[in-house]
Image (spheres, grey):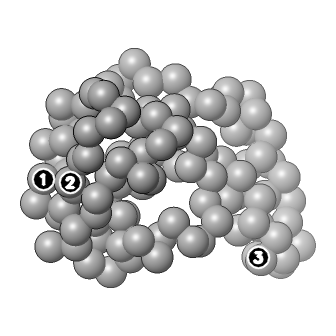
Amino acid sequence: MSTQEKVVLSFNNVSQFLAENFDGVNFVSTMSQEERTKVIERAAACAETGDMQKYHDIMGEIPLDPRVVLRNLVSPFLGLDFLSEGFNLADADKAFGPDWRERFEVRNG
């Protein structure tokens, strides 16, 4: 996919786009399983003490699956507001290119 072409995504076509443009089987996350486990262990320690805000903040360090990112973007409930929630989008950057936010035109419908 050229970095110049505009990609129009909506609830109706996101599954097809992902099927054609994302290899979920062979995709390698930007965070190793070892790093992910350490983050989860840190978060679990916070949950045990009842600090759920810190738990959620720490869990937010784990990169979201690119498929989840796109499906949330086209969701009529979340949409573009999803990008302002502070999630780790490093895997989406890797999967779709660092300029995907500018190239993807999101339509919620």
Determine which of the numbered discs, if any, sits on residue 52 in the image: 3
Sequence-wise first label, 2 or 3: 2
- Work out whether residue 74 can be spotted: yes
Q: In the image, 97: left or right of 75?
A: right
Amino acid on which the number 3 mark rests in the picture: Met
Q: Which of marks 2 and 1 is in front?
A: 2
Amino acid on which the number 2 mark rests in the picture: Val
Q: How crowded is mark 2: few (under 14 residues within 10 Å), some or many (20 or more)?
A: few
In the image, residue 3 sits, relative to residue 26, either above or below, namely: below
Q: In which quarter of the image is residue 72?
A: bottom left
Q: Which residue is drawn at 84% across and 52% down?
A: 42
Residue at the extreme top: 26
Sequence-wise first label, 2 or 1: 2
Q: Residue at x 64, y 65 (%)?
A: 86
Q: Are the residues tagged 2 and 1 within 8 Å (C-beta)?
A: yes
Q: Which residue is drawn at 42% across and 45% down?
A: 100
**The C terminus, quarter of image:** bottom left
Q: Which residue is drawn at 18% across and 63% down?
A: 11
On the image, numbered disc 2 is attached to which residue? 8
